[in-house]
Amino acid sequence: MSRRRTGTPFEERAEDLMGITQVRDGIVRIEQAGTNCYLVTSAGAPYFVDAGLPRTRELAEQALRESGHDWGDVTDVLLTHAHFDHLGFAAHASRAGARIWAHPGDHRIARRPYRYQPGRPRLLYPLRHPASVLVLARMVAAGALKVEGVAQIENLHPGADGLPAGVEVVATPGHTDGHCVLLLPDSDVVFTGDALVTLDPYTGRTGPRIVARAGTKDARGALRSLDAIAATGAGTVLPGHGEPFRRGAAAAAESAAGAGVA
C-alpha cells in the first residue's frame, strides 16, 4: 500500500494533504481536503466506511487497486452519517453493486445532500475562524458543491442484520439525527465520523472535539453522545476529519468534552 505522507502527529500538522495510508492490517485511511473515509477488507471482501467527497473517488480507486480489488468487489458503504462530505462516491459505489447503509434518521439527507439545517448559520464562520478558509476551499475544490444523492439505502442501526462481519453500530445522534459510530472490536478501532473529529473544518481547530454548530444540528446531543464513544473502549479513534487518535476512545471523548463548542 502506497504512503503519500509522513506520520507526523496531528497536533503538529497545519497543512491539509491528501493521500492513502494504512492504519493497520485491513484498514486503509483515504484523506482528501481534511476529510477521511476508510477502506476495510474483511474475509477478503472490501467495504468502505463513509465516501468522502466526489474527487475522493480517484483515491478510493487507487486504494482498491493496491489491495487487489475494483468497484465490483465492494460489498458495502457504511455511512456514519449522510452529510455531503461523507457521501461523495456513494452513488457510484451503489451503481457498481454495493449496498449503501445509513441510519433512517439520515435517509432524507442521503437522498438530498444539501437539504439539512445546521445548528447555527455557517456563513460567518470563515470570518471568525480564518484557519477554516483553506480547509473549506479545498473541500469545494474536491467537489463539495456537486455531491450526488443516493436513492437506495439500507437501514443502519444497532443490531442491524446483513452488515459486514465484525461491525458493531453505536447510535451517536447530535451531529445529525441519525449519526452512528462503527466499532470493530477485533481491530480495536472505532470510526467516529463527525461525532468526534480531530480537525473541525469550520474553525480549523485540531485535537479531539465535536464539529462546530455550523455543521452540527444539535450540539448538546453531540456532547452527550461522547459518552457512547468512550464506552466503546476502542484503542484507536478514526475520525471523519483529521488524524487518527491513538490514545483511546475514552481519552478522546474526555478531551472533546473539554474543548467546548464553537
Image: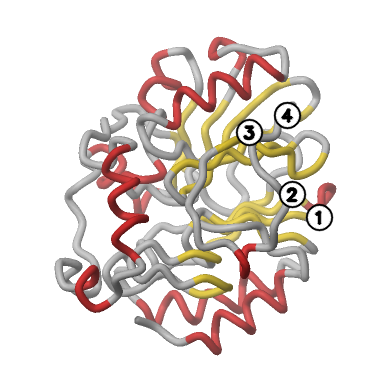
- Distance Cα–Cα, label 2 vs label 1: 6 Å
- Distance Cα–Cα, label 3 vs label 1: 16 Å
Dot 2 or dot 4: first in sequence order is: 4
Q: In screen coordinates, is 224 left or right of 113?
A: right
Identity of the residue drawn at 45% across and 25% down? 57
- Check disc 3 and give the amino acid type: Leu
Give x and y (percent) for residue 152.
35, 27
Task: Give the answer, above or below, for where 178 lies relative to 70.
Answer: below
Give x and y (percent) for residue 54.
35, 31
The residue that disc 1 covers is: 188
Identity of the residue drawn at 53% across and 67% down? 196
The residue that disc 2 covers is: 184
State the SS at label 1.
loop
- Check disc 2 and give the amino acid type: Leu
Dot 4 or dot 1: first in sequence order is: 4
Residues at circles 4 and 3 in contact by the CB criterion of under 8 Å = yes
Q: Quarter holding the N terminus? A: top right
- In this view, the mark in front (2 or 4): 4
Give x and y (percent) for residue 252.
66, 74
Residues at circles 2 and 1 in contact by the CB criterion of under 8 Å = yes
Q: Nearer the viewer, residue 156 or 6?
A: 6
- Check disc 1 and give the amino acid type: Asp
